[in-house]
Amino acid sequence: MPGSVAAPPSVDDTLAHLAGQGYLADRRLGVVVHLALALQRPLLLEGEAGVGKTEVARALAASLGRELIRLQCYEGLDVASAVYEWDYLRQILELRLAEASGEAGSKAALTRSLFDPRFLLRRPLLRALEPHPEGPPVLLIDEIDRADEPFEAFLLELLSDYQVTVPELGVVRAATPPIVILTSNRTREIHDALKRRCLYHWLEYPDAARELAILKSRAPEAGEALAASIVQFVQKLRQRKLYKAPGVAESIDWARAVVALGTHVLTDEVIDETLGVLLKYEEDLGSVREALATEHAAPGR
């Protein structure tokens, strides 16, 4: 059906679609993504920062040939930023031009002319409900845990009926629901009512084999030996008590950074000089460098 979600025929096909965009998902993730498409249900992805939650939406949009519409959540996010607002400066200009030309007309006619769709600034949620020639877009509601609870309640209503009301224009309803992916780093708990609307999946850090495959796919310039060394180091690092363990994105960045220095060997010097690509907090940098120094000073080294 034109404009429908058109889910891949099977879980294996869904995994192949994602892999075609460089996203190597495990089967559990493939199953829940496939079900979200087949059942037209929002998908809530939770997990530590850097495990690839946002990339799922990007890869899915690219594989299906759909537009990716991203709403980045933050504290204080409101309807004007998320749904729509009127272009007041253009409305004022229109009013001044009408008055100057003597064509202002009746108050009702003027109101209709000022609240015309051409003055409407469409924000991500409204854009996601409107028709798209290639089919329903992928709507990424990123880091919903950063938004305030009132906005979460508004989002619950929108995801129930896939419609919003613009008082001056009426109801805007999606002919076919967008593909909705919400992400959360779990800085706070999402309300149960919103979770019940969604399919749910917790993304773990990948195991060594899958992370190596990801590195070989996303940073092929690193080569087999360097990629294996990076995966071994990062996997060991995640076992430490860190303020923020490195994610897959940092592993990829680190591989590219090491290659950019003109080497394919992870020496002690290279590790020390580039550790800031992998770790983002001074406390973590200090503790890891101290541990590495202690390890190197141990007898037998």
Image (tube, grey):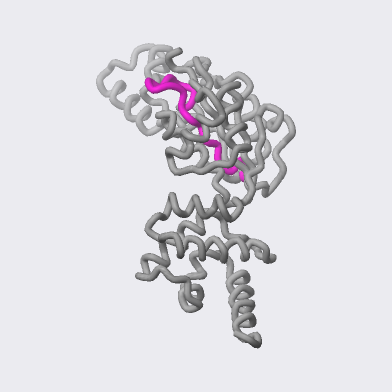
Tell which residue pokes out farthest to the right in this image: 192
Q: x and y percent of residue 219 in the render?
A: 42, 55
Q: Which residues are magenta?
A: 128-146
Q: Is residue 293 left or right of residue 62?
A: right
Q: Residue at (48%, 17%) from the top-left corner?
A: 4
Which quadrant of the view contains residue 30? top right
Q: x and y percent of residue 102 in the render?
A: 27, 17
Residue 231 vs residue 70, the one in the foreground: 231
Residue 287 vs residue 230, the one in the foreground: 230
Tell which residue pokes out farthest to the left in this image: 101
Q: Is residue 145 visible?
A: no
Which quadrant of the view contains residue 88? top left
Residue 151 vs residue 46, the one in the foreground: 46
Q: Residue at (57%, 32%) from the top-left corner?
A: 33
Q: Residue at (58%, 72%) from the top-left corner?
A: 285
8 vs 278: above or below: above
Q: Is residue 296 visible?
A: yes
Is the N terminus in the top left, top right, bottom left or bottom right quadrant? top left
Q: x and y percent of residue 89 in the render?
A: 37, 33
Q: x and y percent of residue 194 in the render?
A: 68, 31
Q: Is residue 122 left or right of residue 151?
A: left
Is the C terminus in the top left, top right, bottom left or bottom right quadrant? bottom right
Q: Residue at (51%, 65%) from the top-left corner?
A: 229
Let me know if residue 142 is in the magenta part: yes
Which quadrant of the view contains residue 111? top left
